């Protein structure tokens, strides 16, 4: 028995409300990543934090994760529309994979983390390294100031005591 209330051409509704937004989700980040790479490459002489080839690697891996998550969904939708029947295992794979998008992105971002020299902590390979260096410089300045204060009060300085006279 055919449905009397709904749209008679359900494929057009699916195309408008599912495929078009998914294509936007895939095309827009691709354009943004390409623009970011071109920007960094054009201004590489002034940008010392990250190299253009590193931006290309990060953008490429990010897009691979995005295409991997949404691509399976698009393939599943296309096959289902072509065959006019659902394939259970492909639909299950597509939906589980799409819901794991956050995990895939986390694994990709973890790929670009490096160990820094001091403290044994983990920091990002880009801006966090320079922020860490800035923080360490401020800590060094604070230690220098505190050592001057200690020398003025007669506290221990580098293994020796400043002599003070008692009366």
Image: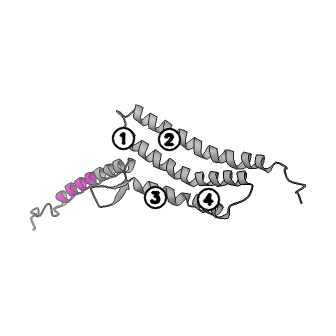
Q: Position of residue 14 (x, y in %)?
A: 74, 50
Q: Quadrant of residue 97?
A: bottom right
Residue shown at 56% from the left, 61% from the top: 100
Q: CA distance from mark 2 to mark 4?
A: 25 Å
SS at badge 1: loop
Task: Specify the segment rendered in magenta.
Answer: 140-151
Q: Which residue is mark 4?
A: 94
Identify the image quadrant of the N terminus. bottom right
Q: Which residue is mark 1?
A: 51
Q: Nearer the viewer, residue 21 or 123?
A: 21
- Lower position in the chain sequence, tag 3 or tag 1: 1
Query: Which label lies toward us, 1 or 4?
Result: 4
- Lower position in the chain sequence, tag 3 or tag 4: 4
Query: Which label lies toward us, 3 or 1?
Result: 3
Q: Residue furthest bottom?
A: 167
Q: Label for residue 153?
A: none
SS at badge 3: helix
Q: CA distance from mark 1 to mark 4?
A: 35 Å
- Lower position in the chain sequence, tag 1 or tag 2: 2
Q: Position of residue 84 (x, y in %)?
A: 75, 55
Identify the image quadrant of the C terminus. bottom left
- Lower position in the chain sequence, tag 1 or tag 4: 1
Image check: 80 left or right of 123?
A: right
Image check: 112 left or right of 92?
A: left
Q: Is residue 43 magenta?
A: no
Q: Label for residue 33?
A: 2
Q: Please say if the residues under marks 2 and 4 sit with CB atoms less than 8 Å apart.
A: no
Q: Label for residue 107?
A: 3
> Count the marks: how many?
4
């Amino acid at each position: 028995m055919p449905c009397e209330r709904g749209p008679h051409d359900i494929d057009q509704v699916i195309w408008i409300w599912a495929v078009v937004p998914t294509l936007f989700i895939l095309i827009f980040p691709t354009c943004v990543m390409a623009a970011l790479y071109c920007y960094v490459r054009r201004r590489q002489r002034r940008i010392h934090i990250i190299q253009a080839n590193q931006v290309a690697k990060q953008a490429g891996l990010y897009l691979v994760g995005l295409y991997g998550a949404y691509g399976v969904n698009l393939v599943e939708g296309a096959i289902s529309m072509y065959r006019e029947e659902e394939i259970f295992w492909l639909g299950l794979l597509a939906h589980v994979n799409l819901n794991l998008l956050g995990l895939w992105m986390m694994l990709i971002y973890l790929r670009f983390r490096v160990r820094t020299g001091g403290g044994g902590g983990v920091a990002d390979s880009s801006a966090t390294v320079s922020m860490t260096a800035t923080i360490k410089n401020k800590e060094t300045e604070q230690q220098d100031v505190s050592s001057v204060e200690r020398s003025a009060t007669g506290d221990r300085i580098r293994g020796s005591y400043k002599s003070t006279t008692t009366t």
